[in-house]
Structures are given as structure tokens and as C-alpha cells.
Amino acid sequence: MQQQHIHIIVCEGASEYAYIQELNRFLKENNFPFTFVPSSSDGGKYSQVIKKYKRIKKDNPRTEILIWIDYDIYKRNDNKNGDHYRSKPRGIPDFLFSYFNFEDFLTLHMKENCLETWQRICSSNNHFLSPMHAIIYEPLFKKIIGYEKGTMPFQITEEHLNRLWKNQDDSRILFHCDFAIFLKNLVNETQS
């Protein structure tokens, strides 16, 4: 049996944690030689994320540690998070951002009609210039997807991942995710 390569992911919260757990199930069932260990920073605030990263790095100096965070507060520069990120010190890895939040990332896995509906709602709320706050987008997203924070609205399949990568590469779709690129590259490496 092939040895599992472990990637630790500092992630924002319960939703990403649930996604990674579901992704790990898919990876294990399909015999991929890698797995992810999620570790929540309890929010995307720059200082919290860095504090969590440093704590994990100290305990796991030789393990690859990724940071997967929503870009919304960095784009809006809430509490100078964007400024702090732009001046991050050497040794802190580039963040893998979901543009602009985890819910946007989830829609990249969905069928075209659902994705288009969400993109229309986001456009009408100026989301791509000034990302909506959770108090606005969460009820809208729940109506369309029937999703609650910290849960997974679907079981990840090969079809979902293929849709994620296809949508990620479609210039008409305004949502993107750096973690999706990382995952696709990792899958391609193991299959070649």
C-alpha cells in the first residue's frame, strides 16, 4: 500500500472543515495517496490565521502547511486584513484564497443553472467589487442551496470535482479558488 502524503490546512472554520473531511472520504475511497488535515483558525482575520499557522508549524516543522481563507475581508480590507497580508513576512506561505467566500467556492461544484443563479444574485449585490457580508449572502445562499454553515450540501463525487475544475477555468464565471487549483494539480500529479 502506498504511503499517504499529509497536507495540513489552516482553514477558516467549520464549513471548510466539513468540506475537507468529505474530500478526504472521496480521496480514500478512490485510493489517492494524499490526505488533508484541517485545522480551523476560527475566522479569516489575518492575525488569527498567522497565529494558528505558527502554532502548527512549530509542532510540524517538516509537514506542508497550507492556508485556505476567504478573500472577502481582504478585498474589503476590513480591519486592514488586506494591508497586513500584503506586508506578510517571508516564511509565511501565500494564502489559498476562495474568491470571495466559501459559499462561492461551493457553487463551483454545482450544475450550471445553480451556479448562474448564484452569480446573478452576486452581481446584483455588487459582490465582485465589494463582497457581501455574511449577514446578506447567507440567507440568499440558503434559499438556493439549502445549506447551513458547517455542513456539506452534497457528497463529493468525481462529477463534482470535474465541474469544479471546468467552472474554475471558465472565464464567464467570476468565482475562483486557489485551493481548487492546488487540488487539481495534486490529483494530476498522482495520476500521471
Image (spheres, grey):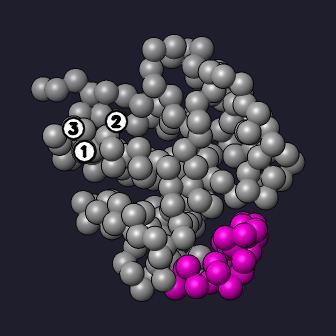
Q: Residue at x 17, y 42 (%)?
A: 191
Q: Nearer the viewer, residue 140 or 169?
A: 169
Q: Main secondary structure of the magenta part?
A: helix
Q: Secondary structure at mark 2?
A: strand
Disc 3/disc 2 C-alpha distance (Å): 12 Å
Q: Which mark is residue 188?
A: 1
Q: Secondary structure at mark 3?
A: helix
Q: Residue at x 64, y 81 (%)?
A: 123
Query: At label 3, which amino acid type do we have?
Result: Thr
Residue 84 lies in the magenta stretch: no
Snapshot quadrant of residue 86? top right
Q: Looking at the rendering, in which quadrant would you find the C terminus?
A: top left
Q: Are marks 3 and 2 in contact (CB under 8 Å)?
A: no
Residue 15 is at least partly visible in this image: no
Q: Secondary structure at mark 1?
A: helix
Number of other residues with Cα within 10 Å of mark 1, as a class: few under 14, some 14 to 19, many 20 or more = few
**Residue 129 spot, x, y in % from top left:** 72, 69
Q: How many marks?
A: 3
Query: At label 2, which amino acid type do we have?
Result: Thr
**Residue 19 spot, x, y in % from top left:** 45, 53
Q: Are marks 3 and 1 in contact (CB under 8 Å)?
A: yes
Q: Nearer the viewer, residue 101 or 30?
A: 101
Between disc 2 and disc 1, whose residue precedes? Answer: 2
In the rendered image, which residue does mark 3 sit on?
190
What residue span does the magenta drawing correspond to? Answer: 117-139
**Residue 120 spot, x, y in % from top left:** 58, 85
User: Where is 171 relative to 24, above or below?
Assistant: below
Residue 127 lies in the magenta stretch: yes
Disc 3/disc 1 C-alpha distance (Å): 5 Å
Number of other residues with Cα within 10 Å of mark 2, as a class: few under 14, some 14 to 19, many 20 or more = some
In the rendered image, which residue does mark 2 sit on?
35
